[in-house]
Image (cartoon, grey):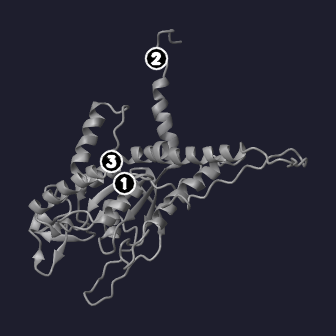
């Protein structure tokens, strides 16, 4: 028998937690938002190294353009080294594509709030599920057109609306359309506009972060918006297959066009950020900040509705003493 000062073993709790989590798997929900034709589907497939969602891009130049016309959710289970990830990808219609784009962001905001509402309803039921199915959006990839000028007014409005309800990560799509100098100037201009319009993006500052986490988050903020190039194809350069893009003029700047070249494309930084360093934090931030704000607002509304004074002459119903829970207020009204 070991003495009282011997090894106890509670340090194995992390292994116990890991075993349970690995058995259950993880859930991650990503939404892609942006104008049509920016390669939203292609980038998601590139990040997770799997063909998860059908690209709407044209195969031939004479083929008519295809667009996402309504919000679509595609679910996949992908596994890596024994870790199972249940991945939901929410593809949204290209906003700003119409002649009249007034309130074109409302269906997207409503969808995000609807997922919060569905989760809250499951939480408030008398007999809850052991593990509530989580459809809340953990990350929104916001695609910016590589114009090289500035954010469009509609981009500013949509970014402002989205940042209030979800973790937003902006990316400059098809950044190989810009030179390195143009890209740097464009990124700087976007950062200035985000600051000017007080648009708060993920990752957020937190007093709980240690020095290492603060340094990591600061490096991410320096990179935002990520300048990326999405590609599901390998291009052979000097006998070596690299992931990149090719046009009728050949391979653009050879190695510089490779998706995984960090100097000319920040795809690797984006992938590492989403999957290797901040995946769990994106999930936790959704629950602790965005969902918590929604939940508090809804529960306060319920409390106020139950505390309203009874009208004179009203008689309480003497049925069976059970009180029905008031319905959650619809998120539709607050989507705008």
Q: Quadrant of residue 251?
A: bottom left
Say few, some or many: other residues with alpha carbon within 10 Å of mark 2 (under 14 / 14 to 19 / 20 or more): few
Q: Earlier in the sequence, mark 1 or mark 2?
A: 2
Say few, some or many: other residues with alpha carbon within 10 Å of mark 3 (under 14 / 14 to 19 / 20 or more): few
Rendering coords of residue 70 (x, y %): 47, 74
Q: Which mark is residue 168?
A: 1
Of residues 55 and 175, the one nearer the viewer is: 175
Compared across the picture, whether 272 is left or right of 71 comes to left
Disc 3 to disc 2: CB gap under 8 Å: no
Q: Secondary structure at mark 3?
A: helix
Q: Badge 3 is on which residue?
A: 276
Which is closer to the viewer, label 3 or label 2?
A: 3
Of residues 184 and 132, the one nearer the viewer is: 184
Residue drawn at x 11%, y 71% as measured from the top left = 252
Which is closer to the viewer, label 3 or label 1?
A: 1
Does 31 sit above or below residue 277?
below
Which is closer to the viewer, label 1 or label 2?
A: 1
Residue drawn at x 47%, y 13% as measured from the top left = 6
All told, the count of numbered labels is 3
Q: Secondary structure at mark 1?
A: strand
Q: Quadrant of residue 157?
A: bottom left
Between the C-alphas of marks 3 and 1, the distance is: 18 Å
Does 213 sit above or below residue 306?
above
Rendering coords of residue 197 (x, y %): 30, 53
In this rendering, does residue 209 appear at all? Answer: yes
Q: Which mark is residue 7?
A: 2
Q: Secondary structure at mark 2?
A: loop
Say few, some or many: other residues with alpha carbon within 10 Å of mark 1 (under 14 / 14 to 19 / 20 or more): many
Disc 3 to disc 1: CB gap under 8 Å: no
Q: Earlier in the sequence, mark 3 or mark 1?
A: 1
Between the C-alphas of marks 1 and 2, the distance is: 46 Å
């Amino acid at each position: 028998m070991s003495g009282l000062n011997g090894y106890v073993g509670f340090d194995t709790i992390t292994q116990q937690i890991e075993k349970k989590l690995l058995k259950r798997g993880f859930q991650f929900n990503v939404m892609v938002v942006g104008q049509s034709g920016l390669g939203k589907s292609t980038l998601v497939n590139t990040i997770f190294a799997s063909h998860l969602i059908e690209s709407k891009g044209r195969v031939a130049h004479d083929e008519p353009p295809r667009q996402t016309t309504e919000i679509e959710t595609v679910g996949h289970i992908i596994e890596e080294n024994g870790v199972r990830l249940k991945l939901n990808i929410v593809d949204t219609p290209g906003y700003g594509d119409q002649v009249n784009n007034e309130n074109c962001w409302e269906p997207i905001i409503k969808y995000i709030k609807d997922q919060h509402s569905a989760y809250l309803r499951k939480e408030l039921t008398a007999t809850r599920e052991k593990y509530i199915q989580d459809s809340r959006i953990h990350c929104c990839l916001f695609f910016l057109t590589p114009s090289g000028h500035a954010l469009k007014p509609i981009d500013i409005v949509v970014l402002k609306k989205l940042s209030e309800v979800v973790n937003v990560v902006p990316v400059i799509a098809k950044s190989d359309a810009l030179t390195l100098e143009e890209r740097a100037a464009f990124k700087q201009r976007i950062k200035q506009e985000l600051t000017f319009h007080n648009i708060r993006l993920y990752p957020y500052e937190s007093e709980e972060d240690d020095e290492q986490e603060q340094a990591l988050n600061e490096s991410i903020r320096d990179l935002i918006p990520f300048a990326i190039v999405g590609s599901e194809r390998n291009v052979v350069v000097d006998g070596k297959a690299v992931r990149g893009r090719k046009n009728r003029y050949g391979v653009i700047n050879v190695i510089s066009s490779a998706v995984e070249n960090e100097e000319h494309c920040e795809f690797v930084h984006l992938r590492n950020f989403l999957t290797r360093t901040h995946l769990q934090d994106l999930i936790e931030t959704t629950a602790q900040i965005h969902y918590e704000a929604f939940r508090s607002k809804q529960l306060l509304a319920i409390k106020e509705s139950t505390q309203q004074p009874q009208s004179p002459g009203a008689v309480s119903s003497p049925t069976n003493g059970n009180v029905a829970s008031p319905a959650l207020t619809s998120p539709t009204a607050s989507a705008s």
